[in-house]
Amino acid sequence: MLGSGPIDLASAATMSNLFWLTDAQMARLQPFFPKSHGKPRVDDRRVLSGIIFINRNGLRWCDAPKEYGPPKTLYNRWKRWSDKGVFARMMVGLAAEAAVPKTVMIDATYLKAHRTATSLRSKKGGQATRGAV
């Protein structure tokens, strides 16, 4: 069944337009994954590689290449891991490993802001004014 077993990295390498996490990358990320309870999960490498591919390319979940498994699996895992803070823990954990301070970029897809947060207008004394100087 597609998406249920480990991926063959040799054949995956021939799919040059797809993104696959390496063994070294997966080893660094493994401690951040939630423990599996009960039924074995679909391969984490396949799913996380698919999630990264979707986000990098700005695709809809339904447009995920079949090599990553069913789009519903990718979305459900992204949603569950997002709600549990898995991605946030990965970012914090990986940033803490770095010996040299670096700039960390966060995709706005994961940030929520109030819809008026970008407004240039502010109210003073009941009148709308252009941004304060």
Image (tube, rainbow, N blue to C red):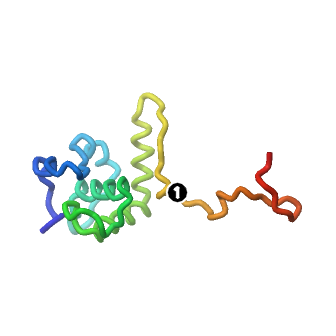
Residue topped by disc 1: 111
- Residue 14: x and y, percent? 13, 49
- Regarding mark 1 in the picture, which secondary structure is present there? loop
Among the 4 quarters of the image, the one containing residue 92: top left
Task: Name, please, the residue furthest toward the right.
Answer: 125
Identify which residue is drawn at 40% across, 55% down: 86
93 vs 108: above or below: above
What's the residue type where badge 1 is placed? Leu
User: Who is closer to the viewer here, 133 or 2?
Assistant: 133
Q: Residues within 10 Å of mark 1 (few under 14, many from 20)?
A: few
Identify which residue is drawn at 47% across, 41% down: 104
Among the 4 quarters of the image, the one containing residue 50: bottom left
Identify which residue is drawn at 21% across, 68% down: 39
Task: Name, please, the residue furthest toward the front.
Answer: 130
State how many labels appear: 1
User: Who is closer to the viewer here, 51 or 79?
Assistant: 51
Quadrant showing the N terminus: bottom left
Task: Name, please, the residue furthest toward the top.
Answer: 100
- Residue 121: x and y, percent? 75, 58
Q: Is residue 67 left or right of residue 78?
A: left
Q: Is residue 44 left or right of residue 12?
A: right
- Residue 13: x and y, percent? 15, 47
Among the 4 quarters of the image, the one containing residue 60: bottom left
Quadrant showing the C terminus: top right
